[in-house]
Amino acid sequence: MKTLLLKIRKNFSLFIFALLFLGITTGKAQFSDLVDFKGSNGSMPHGGLTISGSTMYGMTNSGGANGKGCIFSIGTDGKGYTDLYDFSGGKGGATPDGTLLLSGGVLYGISQLGGTNGVGNIFSFTLNGNTYTDLLDFTGTGAGTTPNAKYPQGSLTLSGGVLYGTSIFGSPVNNNGNVFSVNLNGTGYKDLIDFTGSNGLNPTGSITISGSTIYGTASKGGANGDGCLFSYNTSNSTYTDLYDFNGTKGMTPNASLTLSGSMLYGTASTGGANGDGCVFSFNLNNSTYADIYDFAGANGSTPKGTLTLVNNVLYGMTSAGGAKGNGCVFSMTTSGGAYADLFDFDGTHGATPLGEIIVSGNTVFGMTSAGGASSDGLVFSLGGISTSIDAYSEAANSVLLYPNPCTGIFNLQLKNRLNLTSLAKIDIYNVLGQNVYTSLLDFNQNDQQINFSGNPAGYYNFIITSTVGVIGKGKFILK
């Protein structure tokens, strides 16, 4: 065993880190491939899973009996995969997108190329009896109460018996996409927002609702052409451009927003400090935007899925980057601190996730659009994830480590002096939990520089302590 551990340490496997090491202490994060798509049972899922008890529901964008996608169910234990419905084109739907909405034993969703006009439809699927119903066929033309959307994108959102959604094209104004609403039975279609370019362009995410206000993002357009964050008051039909992305602080938002209190959280798939996308927050009380975390390739790149919030911790996936270049599962606090790369997709174990994850207990569930045994994507679980808020205390955000990733030399900056009058100490741990570096720090200086050169590339954890206790902890990547 000792020889094996030394060999693992020498090779410094990032994969072993993702599976066995979370936080400062060792844990058991276990990746499980629940089902591999292979074409006949579905292919290339573009959304997330919907969970009800011990059963999960999802869709694939293609594959199935007719090659146009399918609706499926699978147990949280990975057993009992069932192809519930195969899309067939026309009113039977084709190329479904997004995550299914479950309400009262009925699943609701959209297909991008289905319906009588071939430009998308809204459907329902009743679980008791496995009955598919084409509720609404989009036209791409018309105005007002005519279903003028074209190529709907993302998922449906339900509020007060009304479904809300977006289309990437369509609307009679500029063919730049819109936001629409429709009753659960497919009647009462309303064109709420027609994008013109200056107020946004081509929305690809879903709608987030709070009371009479809906929130969303447009992937392009706005004042800078890089996309925008918007709100719309359904009671007085007032549209507001809340924030215009500008490249350096994010651009091309493709995912839905996550609302918690007065804070919105989301991802931009490109832009940010390194051009690889970022996680952002927007304070509705004071209209303040913040780029809270920048991806940089090795720690993830091009996030396209919605964030999941549990106990003040944000969970998400990137569609590219990570240690293997195929995307990763990550977590961080709502302030952007304590970032953790929980798992790196490597192709065999999935690649290019495009949807969101769900967190149930200490297990994460999700899908990838590619990779797996047949390269058609898969459904996975990642167990042993700590969702305790104690694991992400404010101490984790009290010290800034930069640059991250680094090439050996990095800086530490104390964000909150905490009346610190004595020396502090930094301890750095490798993936086996072994202390590989210790040094005293003097925060009477503004910054502290650490020379960590000569160590193997990979992930490391650090913890900073003083007489007042733990004042900082986190992770960094050594390139």
Image: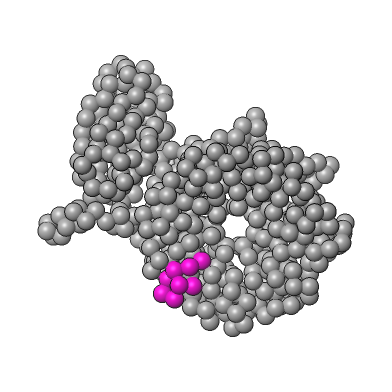
Would residue 312 appear left or right of 116 to someone viewing this image? Answer: left
Residue 419 visible from this viewpoint: yes
The image shows residue 376 at horizontal and vertical percentages of 49, 73
**Residue 106, placed above or below residue 15:** below
The image shows residue 274 at horizontal and vertical percentages of 47, 42
Q: Quadrant of residue 381?
A: bottom left
Residue occupying image coordinates x 70% and y 39%: 223
Residue occupying image coordinates x 67% and y 60%: 153
Q: Quick check: is 372 in the magenta stretch?
A: yes
Dominant secondary structure, magenta = loop
The stretch of residues the image draws in magenta is 369-376
Visual colour scheme = one colour
Residue 54 visible from this viewpoint: no
Q: Nearer the viewer, residue 387 or 246?
A: 246
**Residue 106, placed above or below residue 425:** below
Q: Nearer the viewer, residue 444 or 124?
A: 444
Q: Quadrant of residue 244?
A: top right
Would residue 283 appear left or right of 18 to someone viewing this image? Answer: right
The image shows residue 161 at horizontal and vertical percentages of 76, 57
- Picture quarter with the N terminus: bottom left
What number of labels is visible? Answer: 0
Residue occupying image coordinates x 49% and y 64%: 368
The image shows residue 125 at horizontal and vertical percentages of 68, 72
Would residue 188 appear left or right of 438 to someone viewing this image? Answer: right
Residue occupying image coordinates x 61% and y 39%: 246
Q: Nearer the viewer, residue 478 or 1?
A: 478
Q: Quick check: is 364 in the magenta stretch?
A: no
**Residue 375, placed above or below residue 416:** below
| Residue most extreme to the left | 3
Q: Quadrant of residue 455?
A: top left
